């Protein structure tokens, strides 16, 4: 009888913690998916100090920051490091006239409108949301990108209408 | 608690959390793809719209439009505010054009007939195959020496595309170009040419008139150039610093336009011409007309006395005299003749009568009246004079005289009366090539389909007819890349012409159709002083013109005298009334088939937005209806929504009843547009097509099938109809919301709603 109670309690603890674990994963853990090309932000943005907006050129003009077009990659890599197997992969896409199918790391649900333009124009650093990308070999999501996290920042900077529903959910 | 149990709990918790995290990570949806451009197009910033100027081709008016393009997709169409026709406005069909562009039922690429003709059984083929097959067929016909058996059936094509098809036909050696559209104003062109010697449709200056007398012109929804005329109408009624103009509409039913009028004059169907001539006679007799030929006019108009007219039109004598007095004394005044006066068996006579009326009242060639349009910018680019009509093609097909048919942008199997049996006739044609975008009742008869780009995907230009008093040339540019595997019609025609070789190949310009348009415009630029003065170089001019949408010498209106002489029109003036099929005893009701605001001639029926749009007068959606006066309905014993049979001597169709006070008790009316057997998922098997039960009566002068040329009877079916309408009731249900006072009771106090 007593054994049974112990088993039940064990089972309950197992189920509850399973849920807790799932919530932790869902809410706080990012992912660093494998990309079609082993692209290193550390080399580009860190070691070589290429500004973010050289490649993500739409960030201060549009809602999306923009993934660099393949032409932009080839602009440098026609000459630079052409012997690297990863660069040869890029050249392969270019020769086949195929865009590179990158995997999204930062994803927002459809009911939120996030304009990069406004945040960049307001003087926010890319790193405030994306973390120290210039130190990452593989990009990883750092921020939870949840509403509470957004609002914390909107409160900190005293954003005009920063707590209105329609500011983001339009 | 034992230590062992505690450890068990800790273990379970640890493993649980770990598995939970792993599970949570594992089931996270894989990140969606981020696909960059290979080479970014010019001017594209993701999420930021660009607006490109073009011309609307949903009807023939040629409104200038701006198309909003975001990330390579067309998202919205608006009127081009710089454009003199649209002035930044756009009608519902123009707005809905996007749904024909992105329509899921568009023909995605070249097709070849597989099964029996008309069974809608096609197989996809490549463009190379399609072009070589059609070229071979053209050569074959030419080798047999039967070049004149090639027929081209299109809507009236404006601009360079029209000129290219003309060159193609001329080079090939055929004169059989047939222009057909259900509403292409052939009667109006003919009447204006006969009475005023005008080839182009004049500008009806509604904007500046003080008294508009319209004989059934539904310019608020479909007639001629609805956006332009509606803008003028707005100015006339509510413009600043001017007197509000008066507007009287003569029509058997209250259309959207009539609903806006100060007075609705429901003349008996078929008698409108007599009314116009009776008013003209009153004006001439009153001495208002001072021309030297006044006595000739008096003689010509003598048969149209007031007593006769009052009887023929079923109107009060006082009413007719009142209109005549106002029409001649209000300066300037303007009479226009639209569908309901031109759609009878003697339609041309009705429109000539309107011209006579304008002449004797002194409305021709003046501001606020009828103003002639200047000659076209390019010779031959404007929609041409009245050539042979669709009836000529059908007769030739019946006689097996058509060797090959090229078909584009119209649907005669749907828009000609059922008795004409157009589809049956076309089945006699050995080889039909279609350039259609949709599988409709006519396209299904073709042997091979080479789908053309839509105007949003193609280069082109449009020369407005009617223009607003000065030339308007609108440019079309590809605002998006083709959605499907379609090709520019100009390129297809040019390639076919080159393939056939000989004289036709010589007539084909070099390069692509886009090159041809630009080159031709550069010639025009060097010849036209206004154009050369507007920019230093042609490249500069071309860039500016593409950005603004076209070229128009605004305000360059040249006064041109217009007149009508009794000699010219005598043969069109007669007391012979319009003919109607069906004896009045057996078929007691007139049938009026009219263009519905969203569907026009039926082309809008495959656009869900237009199906969903409540008709502006009846509020009905997704179907057809038959308008019946409540008095007539009471006599027939039918009520709102009942399914009834509408029977003419030539057939019967079914439609639900719409009770409508705004129609004569001896008339019923049905909108055109529904009743497609084939035209995509949104149009098929919905409602009924009133053209099906019309006789093959034509006005012999133009070959136009008369839409209002039959009487019908209404039979009960005893079943409820499928009428869906957005308003609940037009009755105020005793709430005294709309208070009225009878004309005789002036000065008396109306019954108060407060007790």
Image (tube, coloured by chain):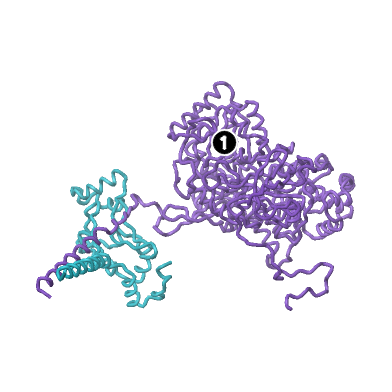
Observer able to see residue B698 = yes
Label 1: chain letter: B
Q: Position of residue A165 (x, y in %)?
A: 41, 72
Q: Which of the pair B674/B545 is nearer the observer?
A: B674
Q: Position of residue B640 (x, y in %)?
A: 67, 55
Q: Which of the pair B526/A98 is nearer the observer?
A: A98
Q: Quadrant of residue B331?
A: bottom right
Q: Quadrant of residue B244?
A: bottom right
Furthest residue toward top:
B144
Q: What residue would you read off at disc 1?
A: B407
Q: Quadrant of residue B184?
A: top right
Quadrant occupied by the N terminus of chain B:
bottom left
Q: Which of the pair B577/B347 is nearer the observer?
A: B577
Colour of the chain lettered B: purple
Q: Eyeballing the image, is A106 above or below B713? A: below
Judge from the rendering whether residue B109 lies leftward or rightward of residue B32; answer left or right. Answer: right
Furthest residue toward left:
B3
Q: Position of residue B494 (x, y in %)?
A: 51, 35
Q: Eyeballing the image, is B518 above or below A42? A: above
Colour of the chain lettered A: cyan
Q: Which of the pair B160/B222 is nearer the observer?
A: B222
Observer able to see residue B366 = no
Q: Eyeballing the image, is B163 above or below B277? A: above
Quadrant occupied by the C terminus of chain B:
bottom right
Marks counted in the figure total 1
Q: Position of residue B291 (x, y in %)?
A: 85, 50
Name which residue lies at 24% across and 54% down.
Answer: A35
Secondary structure of residue under mark 1:
strand
Q: Eyeballing the image, is B709 above or below B665? A: above
Judge from the rendering whether residue B455 lies leftward or rightward of residue B148; answer left or right. Answer: left
Q: Label 1 crowding class (10 Å Cα cut-off): few <14, some 14-19, many 20+? A: many
Name which residue lies at 41% across and 70% down.
Answer: A167
């Amino acid at each position: 009888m007593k054994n049974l109670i112990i088993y039940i309690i064990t089972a309950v603890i197992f189920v509850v913690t399973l849920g807790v674990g799932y919530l932790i994963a869902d809410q706080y853990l990012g992912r660093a998916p494998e990309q079609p090309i082993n692209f290193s932000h550390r080399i580009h943005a860190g070691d070589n100090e290429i500004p973010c907006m050289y490649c993500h050129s739409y960030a201060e003009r549009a809602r999306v920051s923009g993934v660099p077009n393949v032409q932009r990659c080839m602009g440098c890599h026609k000459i630079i490091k052409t012997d690297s197997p990863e660069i040869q992969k890029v050249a392969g896409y270019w020769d086949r006239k195929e865009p590179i199918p990158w995997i999204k790391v930062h994803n927002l649900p459809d009911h939120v409108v996030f304009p990069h333009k406004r945040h960049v124009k307001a003087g926010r650093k890319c790193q405030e949301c994306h973390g120290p990308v210039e130190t990452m070999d593989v990009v990883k999501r750092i921020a939870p990108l949840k509403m509470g996290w957004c609002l914390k920042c909107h409160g900190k900077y005293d954003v005009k209408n920063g707590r209105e529903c329609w500011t983001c959910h339009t | 608690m034992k230590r062992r149990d505690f450890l068990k709990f800790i273990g379970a918790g640890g493993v649980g959390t770990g598995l939970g995290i792993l599970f949570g990570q594992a089931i996270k949806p894989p990140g969606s793809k981020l696909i960059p451009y290979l080479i970014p197009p010019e001017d594209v910033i993701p999420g930021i719209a660009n607006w490109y100027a073009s011309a609307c081709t949903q009807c023939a008016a040629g409104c200038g439009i701006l198309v909003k393009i975001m990330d390579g997709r067309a998202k919205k169409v608006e009127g081009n505010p710089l454009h003199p026709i649209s002035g930044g406005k756009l009608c519902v069909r123009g707005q809905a054009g996007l749904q024909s562009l992105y329509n899921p039922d568009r023909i995605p690429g070249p097709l070849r007939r597989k099964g029996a003709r008309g069974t809608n059984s096609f197989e996809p083929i490549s463009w190379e195959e399609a072009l070589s097959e059609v070229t071979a067929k053209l050569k074959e016909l030419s080798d047999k020496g039967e070049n004149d058996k090639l027929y081209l059936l299109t809507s009236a094509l404006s601009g360079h595309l029209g000129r290219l098809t003309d060159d193609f036909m001329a080079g090939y050696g055929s004169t059989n170009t047939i222009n057909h559209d259900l509403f292409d104003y052939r009667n109006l062109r003919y009447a204006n040419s006969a009475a005023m010697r005008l080839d182009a449709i004049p500008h009806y200056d509604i904007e500046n008139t003080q008294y508009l007398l319209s004989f059934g012109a539904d310019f608020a929804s479909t007639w001629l150039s609805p956006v332009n005329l509606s803008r003028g109408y707005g100015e006339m009624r509510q413009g600043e610093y001017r007197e509000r103009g008066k507007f009287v509409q003569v029509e058997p039913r209250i259309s959207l336009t009539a609903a806006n009028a100060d007075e609705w004059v429901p003349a008996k169907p078929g008698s409108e011409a007599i009314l116009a001539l009776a008013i003209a006679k009153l004006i001439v007799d009153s001495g208002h007309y001072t021309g030297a030929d006044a006595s000739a006019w008096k003689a010509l108009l003598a048969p149209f006395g007031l007593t006769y007219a009052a009887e023929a039109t079923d109107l009060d004598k006082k009413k007719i005299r009142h209109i005549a007095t106002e029409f001649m004394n209000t300066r300037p005044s303007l009479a226009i003749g639209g569908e309901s006066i031109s759609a009878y068996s003697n339609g041309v006579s009705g429109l000539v009568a309107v011209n006579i009326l304008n002449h004797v009242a002194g409305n021709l060639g003046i501001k606020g009246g009828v103003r002639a349009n200047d000659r076209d910018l390019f010779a031959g680019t404007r929609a041409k004079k009245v050539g042979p009509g669709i009836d000529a093609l059908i007769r030739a097909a019946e006689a097996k005289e058509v060797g090959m048919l090229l078909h584009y942008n119209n649907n005669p199997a749907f828009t000609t009366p059922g008795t004409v049996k157009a589809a049956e006739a076309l089945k006699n044609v050995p080889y039909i090539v279609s350039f259609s975008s949709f599988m409709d009742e006519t396209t299904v008869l073709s042997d091979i389909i080479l789908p053309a780009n839509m105007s949003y995907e193609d280069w082109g230009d449009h020369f407005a007819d009617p223009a607003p008093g000065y030339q308007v040339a609108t440019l079309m540019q590809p605002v998006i890349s083709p959605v499907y595997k379609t090709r520019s019609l100009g390129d297809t025609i040019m390639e076919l012409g080159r393939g056939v070789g000989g004289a036709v190949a010589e007539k084909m310009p070099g390069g692509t159709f886009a090159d041809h348009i630009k080159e031709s415009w550069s010639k025009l630029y060097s010849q036209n002083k206004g154009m050369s003065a507007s920019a230093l170089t042609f490249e500069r001019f071309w860039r500016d013109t593409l950005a603004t949408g076209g070229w128009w010498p605004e305000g360059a209106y040249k006064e041109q005298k217009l007149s009508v002489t009794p000699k010219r029109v005598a043969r069109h003036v007669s007391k012979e009334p319009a003919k109607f099929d069906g004896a009045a005893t057996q078929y007691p009701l007139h049938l009026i088939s009219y263009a519905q605001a969203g569907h026009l001639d039926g082309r809008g029926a495959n656009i869900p937005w237009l199906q969903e749009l409540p008709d502006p007068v009846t509020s009905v959606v997704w179907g057809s209806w038959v308008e019946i006066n409540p008095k007539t309905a009471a006599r027939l014993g039918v009520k709102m929504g009942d399914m009834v049979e509408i029977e003419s001597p030539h057939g019967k169709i079914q439609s639900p009843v719409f009770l409508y006070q705004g129609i004569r008790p001896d008339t019923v009316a049905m909108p055109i547009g529904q009743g497609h057997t084939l035209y995509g998922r949104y149009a098929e098997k919905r409602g009924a097509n009133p053209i099906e039960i019309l006789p093959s009566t034509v006005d012999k002068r133009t070959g136009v099938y008369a839409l209002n040329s039959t009487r019908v009877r209404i039979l009960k079916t005893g079943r409820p109809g499928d009428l869906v309408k957005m308003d609940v009731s037009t009755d105020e249900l005793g709430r005294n919301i709309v208070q009225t006072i009878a004309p005789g009771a002036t000065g008396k106090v109306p019954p108060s709603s407060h007790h």
